[in-house]
Image (cartoon, grey):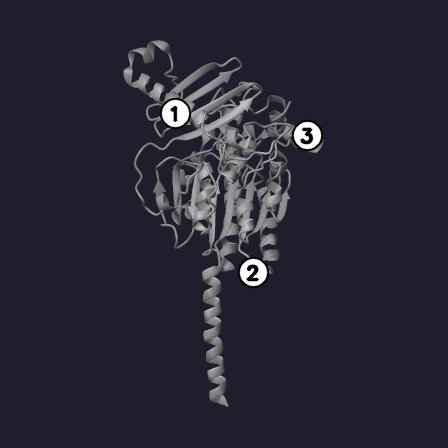
Amino acid sequence: MKTFKIILISALAVLGIFFLTAKFRNKRPNIIIITIDALRRDHLGCYGYGRLTSPNIDELAKKGVLFDQAITQAPVTAGSVPSLFSSTYPSTNGHCLLSEEPILLSLPTLSSILQEHGYFTAAISAHGELFSETPGLEDSFDTISDTFKEPADILTNRVIKWFKWFGMNKRKPFFLWIHYFDTHAPYQPPNPYDRMFVTSNPSLKEINLRQDFKTSGLFPGKTRNLDRKTADYYICQYDGGIRFIDDQINLIVNFLKNRGLFKNTIIVITADHGENLYDRKKQFGHGFMLYDVLLRVPLIFVYQDHLPAGTVINRQVQLIDITPTLLKLAGIKTGLPFEGRDLSSLMSGKRETGESYAFSEIEQGEVIMRAVRLPDWKLIEVEYPGSINEYELYNLKKDPNELTNLVVQEKWEFDRKIKYRFDSLRAKLEKWRWRDKGAYKLIYEVHPLDEDSKTNLKVLGYFE
Ligand SMILES: [Zn+2]
C-alpha cells in the first residue's frame, strides 16, 4: 500500500511538473508601464543628476536597459499618450493638440492588442483626464482608476490593492499602466519631500506655491519673470516630487518581488514629456515648444533574465517604439503598420548603423510646430497660416541647451556644413510630413470634453 502511495505521489508530482511547465511555457509576461508626468530624464540619478532624486529607479535601471536618447512625439500628455499606445505619430492618430474636442483614438493600441491576446488590462492614474483627452482608449482597459491629482502614496495604495484583488484571478497575465502626477506643476510634494532638497534662504519656506502658480501661471505663454531664487525653490519641489514617486515605485517593486511576480514582469519606466524648469524664457511647465527639455524623456526597460542588466543604449529611440517592443517581448505578432519599431534586438546587443531620426509635433490654433532630431542636430519648423515657415536649427553636440539658432541667413550661407545640415533635415522633415498614412483607418468621431474635464484641465493651466 505504501509503495502504491509513493508511486501515486510520484506520478502526481510528475504530472504536476508537466502541467506547471506547460503552463509556464504558455504564460506570457506581465507588463507594467509606469509613466511619470513631465519627468525630465536629466533629473534622475541614472541619467547623471547630482541630487538623490531617484535611488530606487537607479537600482532598477541597473537591472535593465536604459535608453539615453529617448524622444517623445509630443510635449503634452494629450499628444504623447495616443502616440505611445498606438505606435503612431500625432499627425497619424489625429492627436496633435490639446483640444476641447478630442477625436476618437480609433487605431489598435498596446492595451487593445494585449486584451485580445488574453491579458487583463488595467490603468491606475493620478492624471484625472487621461481618458477624456484620449477617447476610445478606455475601451481597451478592463479596469480604470483615473483620479485627478492623486498623490503618489495614495495612488500606490490603489495599485497594491489592485494587485491583491487581481491575485485571486491570476489565470491571465496582466498589463498595468500606472501614471504618476506629482512631477506636474505646481509641484507640491508632501513632507518630507517638500524640504528634502531645499538648501537656500529659509524665508522661501513661506512661498505659497499654489497661489503663485494660480496668479503667474507656470506654463509657456503666461510670462512672469520669476527670480532665480524662486525658480530654484520650484525646482527643489519638482525634485522632491520625483523622490516621492521614486519611493512609491520601490514599494511596488518590493511587492512584486515578495509575491514572486518580479521575474515574469516587464517593467517600463518613462514619461509622457519633459518639463521646462526655467530653462526657456524663465518659465516653467510644458506645451507649445519642441526643445529638448520637453522632448527628452527617461526610458528604462526591466525584464530580469531576458534583458541584459546594466545596459545603456545611446542610439536615439522614440516613445512610439515602446508598443512594438513590448509586443515582441510578449511573443505577439500583429502585422500592424506601426510607425515605431521593435527595440528588442537593440537591447540584446545588436549593433545598428545609419542615422536614427526622431519626429515630434504639436499644434496650437492654426500654428503647427514640427521637429526632426538626430542625436547631434535638430531642426524645428513652425508653420503659420499661408504656408509661412520659420526654422530653428541647433547643433545639439555643441549647444545642448539650444540657445543658438543657426538658421541665420548670413551664417548658413557662409558655412556649407551647416547649410548641408539644414537642407538635409528639412528634406527629411518634408518627406516625413507627406508620408503615406493610407494604412491607418481613422474614424473622425469627436468626443467633446465635459464641463468637469474642462475645469480640471483649466486648473492645470491648459485652457484659459
Ligand atoms: Zn503630461
Q: Which residue is mark 3?
A: 455
Q: Is residue 329 left or right of residue 96?
A: left
The three-letter amino acid code for the residue at tag 3 is Thr
Residue in the picture at 48% in, 68% down: 19
Q: Which residue is mark 2?
A: 171
x, y (%) of residue 445?
A: 63, 32
x, y (%) of residue 278?
A: 49, 24
User: How dense is the environment of label 3, judged by Cα within 10 Å: few (below 14), some, or many (20 and up)?
Assistant: some
The three-letter amino acid code for the residue at tag 1 is Lys
Q: Is residue 201 visible?
A: no
Tell me the distance, in whole angstroms, between the alpha carbons under discs 2 and 3.
40 Å
Label 3: element kind: helix
Tell me the distance, in whole angstroms, between the alpha carbons under discs 3 and 1.
40 Å
Q: Is residue 280 above or below residue 132?
A: above
Residue furthest to the top:
410
* Image quadrant where residue 214 sits: top right
Closest to the observer, 205 or 338: 338
Label 1: element kind: helix
Q: Which mark is residue 428?
A: 1
